[in-house]
Amino acid sequence: PIIPDYLAEVLRDVESDTSGELAGYIPELAAADPERLGAAFAMIDGEVYGAGDIDIEFTIQSISKPFIYALALSDRGFDPVLAKVGVEPSGEAFNEISLESDTGRPLNPMINAGAITVHSLAGTEDLNPTERVERVLHGLSAFAGRRLKMDEAVCASEMEHAHRNLVIAHMLRSHNVLTKDPRAIVDGYTRQCSVLVTTRDLAMMAATLANRGTNPLSGEQVVPEPVVRQVLSVMFSCGMYDAAGDWATQVGIPAKSGVAGGLIGALPGQIGIATFSPRLDGHGNSVRGVSLFERFSSDMGLHVMEVP
Ligand code: GLN
């Protein structure tokens, strides 16, 4: 088994790196096992290869952002979404309290300000907050190809400490970027971040993006192709926050990280990749996840700017 052997070897190479910290600002996440380590490849024909802890569940966190952006674009169309959230890299931390000065618009959908706004744009306008969360959960499940659920403890733990996201949401409300109750929107966004996934699920979700929006296992077209192009472009320029430039040059794969330790990458027409390791660097990206992707990219020539 060439691919599983290769994955196991690369995991062994990064295993000894215990640098980085768990996400301390969400107490439930700080209680996670820091030693977990896994990696999975999902091919666009539905084949999955993995090594390590690929069937352990953890919360999706910010990796939900590109998928909910995809749902909002497909539910509302491009113009209403682009009118509210830009596509410019911010070069700032994921939770920065910053909005475009003239319009109050968040710079991009990958930082919290953008993602909170995008959450409010998932599903049709008339949905109540509970129905919107249901649309989000249903959509994430379609990307994964199985019914996902939420971790209520992580959600409650984050909501207790969500002051920063509440500030951001109130600022967005004051600029009329958000038009409904900011607290209910942050609650829905936090639920979105608390959806439980495995590394295998994340690889399949990434493979759905790599496969023009069609889940390789279920065959369901989850979002249209132009939406996928938009989402992968924004992942490439903004997915790793203030480390996006380093990532684009060194790894060169559209990607998204989450503070529970997950990391995904999607290569159009080829493969979805996911890794899991909870200790984070100063940008909130998984330390060993970044190392794994650097290895994958250089060993297999996956940088999108390289001629294969
Ligand atoms: N739920 C987290 C937050 O809003 C997600 C952050 C992340 O994964 N980078 O702070």
Image (cartoon, rainbow, N blue to C red):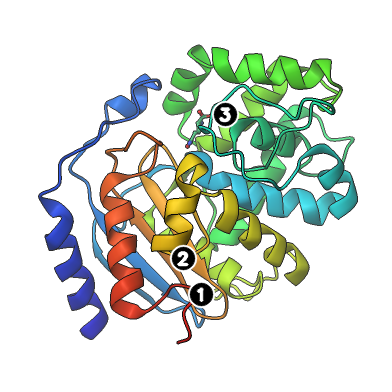
> Looking at numbered disc 1 in the image, what kind of residue is underneath it?
Met
Task: Mark 1 and mark 3 in contact? Answer it, CB < 8 Å.
Answer: no
The foreground one among 248 and 8 is 248
Vertical relation: 25 (above or below) 2: above
Identified at 62% across, 62% down, the residue is: 232
Ranked by sequence position, the earlier of labels 2 and 1 is 2
Q: For the residues carrying marks 1 and 3, which lies nearer the camera in this image?
A: 1
Task: Mark 2 and mark 1 in contact? Answer it, CB < 8 Å.
Answer: yes
- Element type where label 2 sits in the image: loop
The foreground one among 142 and 271 is 271
Left-right relation of 2 to 212: left
Disc 1 target residue: 305
Visible in this render: residue 103?
Answer: yes
For label 3, being within 8 Å of ligand 1 is answered yes
Ranked by sequence position, the earlier of labels 1 and 3 is 3
The foreground one among 255 and 2 is 255
Disc 2 target residue: 252
Ranked by sequence position, the earlier of labels 3 and 2 is 3
> Looking at numbered disc 3 in the image, what kind of residue is underneath it?
Thr
- Element type where label 1 sits in the image: loop
Inter-mark Cα distance, 3 to 2: 29 Å
Disc 3 target residue: 190
For label 2, being within 8 Å of ligand 1 is answered no
| Quarter of the view holding residue 180 | top right
